[in-house]
Image (cartoon, helix red, strand yellow):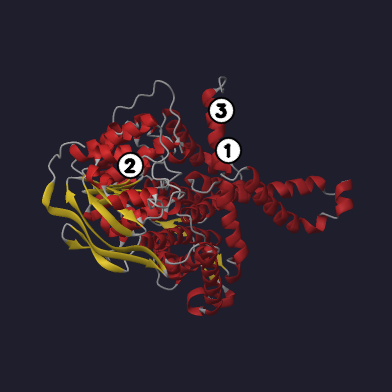
Amino acid sequence: MRESVRVDAETPILEAERVSLRFGGVRALTDVSFAVRRGEIFSIIGPNGAGKTSMVNCVSGRYRPTEGRILFEGRDITRMPTRRRAALGIGRTFQNLALFGHMTVLDNIMVGRHHLLRSGFLRGMVYWLGGAQREEIAHRREVEEIIDFLEIQHVRKAVAGQLPYGLRKRVELARAVALRPKLILLDEPMAGMNLEEKEDMARYILDLNEEWGMTVLMIEHDMGVVMDISQRVMVLDFGRKIAEGPPEAVLADEHVKRAYLGEADEAVSEPEEAVA
Amino acid sequence: MAVMTPAGDYRTTYREDMTIFPTLGSRVALWAGIALLCLAPLVLDRYLLHLLINIGFLGIAALGLNILVGFTGQISIGHAAFFGFGAFASAWLHDVLHVPVALAIPLAGLMTAMVGLVFGAPAARLKGLYLAIATLAAQFILEDFFARAQWFTGGVAGRVTEPFGLFGIAFDRDETYFYVVLAFVVVMFLGAANLMRTRDGRALVAVRDHYLSAEMMGINLAYYRTLSFGIASFYAGIGGALYAHYLLFVSVEAFNILFSIQFLGMVIIGGLGSVMGSLMGAAFMVLLPEVVQGLANLLAGSPIDRALRLGASISYLREMVIGAAIILFLMFEPDGLAHRWRLIKAYWKLYPYSH
């Protein structure tokens, strides 16, 4: 674990208050409460099907909690439409890549600027006359900074869908960063990566947090990464929160051990695939 | 699409990097092409000009459909009805309200866009096959409207209208009207190309490629799905209005579902999601029957003709060839003529070291 940078424990950027989510008879989340502090890296871990992605989907607006509230910077966003959350400052990446496959890398990232751009279709069509060109150039400049940071200069004109997996993951991160979010939600940013790519990604996440000032809420299966870069960890199991705290404390927790390794007396129970 | 730039092409500003025509060669070709087209009325005969004019207004309407189908990933099988609405609207504006034709054409486009927004409203909620059926309803409702709204369309008798005029000059011959259509083609295609490299154009493509993450980027799905219908109808309306002031007579029967399917054929053959492909597709659809006709004339009286009795059924042959062309394109060139054109360009760029 690393030193906390400028975590503000007093004013949480994100609060979930007793969030429950049900699909018919299936309880995806039950009574989950937690708070993410401004400036920290907060990880959600748990066995497959524990409700991690459901929790993130509630924050990003994909799902609407059946019960409970979600507050962003003190403001209730539980029922706010997904599209309005980008302008508030919430960006995310997806577990299974969700790039715009037929667009170039550059265009993908420029879509991230959508809520910051002002030229509608009329001004866009008269590109040179209404200021659309000036705006595009100004934003292109900022997008190039993100491209530099994530080291994807060489593929900026490539079609996103044709890139190898590791690069697509980075492009997706770039697109989320282009939103200029205050809180960035990363759903398994390291999934399917080799060691080197994981190290790169961990460095990017740390830089985003420290230099770009973004609060990170991350789901990750790789325990090594979670231990190394997160300040606090929450553990979900069967849709319930079973532990929260600094990584070492959480790993030492009896409930967590049981969730990952099965009951002590169940000698034959298979360990869940916690470490992918 | 990934852009291939030649060696030694160093761009030092973002402005240079964001042009529609990325290389010197393509810019020269563009201006040379437009200059050549400006000379066309002086050298080509009437019939070829007639074909070019057809390609022009059909290409504009096809571009509209391509924005809807190719770029936004929606579907419409009622495009011809909007094309027809534009034709009637322009004729009505000119003949009844005495709006000058030069003004009536863009106004007709706007009116058609309004109608398109109404019929596009279900698109905010419907997708795929369901949306297809909703647009089919638009086709039939509008066709019925054409037949009944005597005040607007002239009813079954149709509506006679006047040629395009500007500053007292009448563009009433193929040689002159050609320039009107050319000007509209240039403006409308530049508009679409510009749209696609700015905020709202990217949003349309984002909605097509991955609507969930588009929403996460702050894109209002319902707005863009409906907007896409509005823009598509605007283009259809402009195309239809140009058609009306070319033929000078708009009849009710012309805008049937077969015509709508032909528009779909144009965008599929030309290339879904390609601005210039729309024009190529329209050219293909206009020229194909001519080629088939030429073949039939060659075949006439030959043993094959006698065996198959083609002479009398030439029109069926035409429809069959169009159908076969669509099937063949779907199988062998799903990205359309525009993609083939890119491959040819890439081939020559790399020649002779293509591997």
Give the x, y percent position of residue A206. Answer: 24, 37
Nearer to us: label 1 or label 2: 2
As measured in the structure, the alpha-carbon distance from the residue carrying label 3 to the one carrying label 1 is 10 Å
Q: In the shown orientation, is residue B291 left or right of residue A103?
A: right
Residue A268: x and y, percent?
A: 47, 49
Counting from the top left corner in percent of width and height, residue B333 is at 61, 43
In primary-sequence order, the first of circles 3 and 1 is: 1
Q: Are the numbered discs 3 and 1 placed on the same chain, yes or no? A: yes
Q: Secondary structure at mark 2?
A: helix
* Residue named by callout 1: B340
| Quarter-of-image position of residue B7 | top left
Q: Amino acid at mark 1?
A: Arg
Residue hosting label 3: B347
As shown in the figure, which amino acid type bears the numbered disc 2? Answer: Leu
- Which quadrant of the figure contains the C terminus of chain A? top left
Q: 10 Å neighbourhood of mark 1: few (<14), some, or many (≥20)?
A: some
Q: Which mark is residue B25?
A: none
Horizontal and vertical percent position of residue B345: 53, 31
Chain of the residue under label 3: B
CA distance for labels 3 and 2: 35 Å
In the displayed structure image, the side of residue A17 where residue B325 appears, left or right: right
Q: Which residue is mark 2?
A: A173
Check if mark 3 and mark 2 are on a common chain.
no
Q: CA distance from mark 1 to mark 2?
A: 33 Å
Query: Within 10 Å of the Cα at label 2, are there few (<14), some (14-19), or many (20+) other Cα atoms?
Result: many
Q: Secondary structure beneath disc 3?
A: helix
**Camera sees residue B15:** no
Which SS class for mark 1? helix
